[in-house]
Image (cartoon, rainbow, N blue to C red):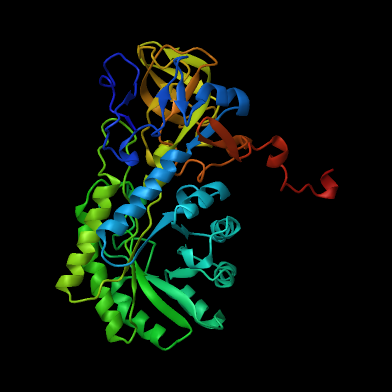
Amino acid sequence: MLSTHPVETQNSGRQYLPQTHSNSTLSPNQELLPITAKINQRDRLEIGGCDVAELVEKFGSPLYVVDEATLRTTCRQYRDTLNRCYPGQSQVLYASKAWNCLAIAAIVHSEGLGIDVVSGGELYTAVQAGIPGDKIYLHGNNKSVEELELAIASSCTIVVDNWLELKNLAEIVNSSQRIMLRFTPGIECHTHEYIRTGHLDSKFGFDPHQLDEVLEFISQHPVLELIGFHAHIGSQIFELQPHQDLAGVVVQWLGKAAAKGLPVRELNIGGGLGIRYTESDDPPSIAEWVQNVSQAIVNACTIQHQPLPKLLCEPGRSLIGTACITAYTIGSSKTIPEIRTYIAVDGGMSDNPRPITYQSIYRAVVANRMSAPATETVTVAGKHCESGDVLIKNAQLPKTVPGDILAVLATGAYNYSMASNYNRLPKPAAVLVQDGEANLILQRETYQDLIRQDCLPERLR
């Protein structure tokens, strides 16, 4: 595995360089680069045995490059650590909103993971990828009747979020339907306001004060088979204490359900473990997070005299985030004396909306000249007609020229899945790399794709 600690600090006048450490104990979410990353003899960044600049020559740019080895490693670390640390039954679910497509779903399924989906489209993709219904959990705060019917037909578990869908299910279910209940546990963590979902002021989940009333409703509708509870406290979390607090809250719900004659057997404590986007980020390892969660549930069950439930967790970002880089081709530049220098790339907020949405910070390297010293401080701008379309402010990079390949690191989570066609830019292609082989998993959109759903009334022809 490659350590992603820089040879020198980011402001030391050198471009970031990975170093090989055969005994590295870092887990992939603590790395900046995919675990197969190296610098080849041509001084180029190589991922999965594939030269990134050559990938751009073949597939074009912007280009998502997904390292299969990194993705499989994170799956196995979650799966194996949970099996080792939690004495009861357990199941890791991939939170596919981070990146949902056929190939990614098929890989996580092949590693024994289930999948968490949040829409009819994500559910349909999971089914088409060959994932069985008993490994699929449907979330969402405003599921349509059509989505509920698709979930029932797919034999997946429905995580009920509110009264409307609970009552809709009671009306449309003909035979037994597995459900879980999502509650807001009232726990806050230090993360972006938009990705905190555990505090009471959230659009997600039942208010915990409604627990007794909800359980009473379910007890009167035997077609609704309550198998568990779900809670999620947020995303990109570096703290461990909030999940210890969460365990004490959710285990209390088990006792209340049992008192209503509803023996709940599953607890889903969500995900939320952060990843390393820059050198200053210091998230816990996957193993630390899983150990913390497992022990917290065991301790809470012991204190509250509850049997161990089946423990579910649903990581997304920390599974896929560092498995991917995005390769761009550098184009124009603009220097404003004594203010800043802009360099523009052939993508931007349409393929990575996180900087403009969450003020997210990323790290980048010039992939075709990895040993070049970082002599300039530049702002990496996208090509969209939007002043806020900036991918990285104050990036430390070598002197660049048009045609250089810029690799932005850790772009696997919420880049493709939140991509748009703003300014009618076609969405990028994505390739899966392993052992020197690159396979398309997403074709690049064409201009024809952009107008495929357009309708031109006859009178305007």
- In the rendered view, would you say 189 is above or below 331? below
Q: How many marks?
A: 0
Q: Nearer the viewer, residue 443 or 196?
A: 443
Quadrant in which residue 298 is drawn: bottom left
Residue 22 visible here = yes
Extreme-bottom residue of the structure:
220
Quadrant in which residue 129 is drawn: bottom right
The percent position of residue 292, horizontal first and vertical second, equals 22, 55
Q: Nearer the viewer, residue 287 or 414?
A: 287
Q: Nearer the viewer, residue 135 or 413?
A: 135
- In the rendered view, would you say 28 is above or below 91? above
The percent position of residue 304, horizontal first and vertical second, equals 17, 74
Q: Residue at x 38, y 49 (%)?
A: 76
Q: Nearer the viewer, residue 244 or 377?
A: 244
Q: Residue at x 28, y 65 (%)?
A: 185
Q: What is the quadrant of the C terminus in the image?
A: top right
- In the rendered view, would you say 194 is above or below 15? below
Q: Residue at x 31, y 58 (%)?
A: 83
Q: What is the quadrant of the N terminus in the image?
A: top left
Q: Is residue 150 left or right of residue 206?
A: right
The percent position of residue 6, horizontal first and vertical second, equals 29, 24
Q: Residue at x 39, y 12 (%)?
A: 372
Extreme-left residue of the structure:
303
Residue 429 visible here = no
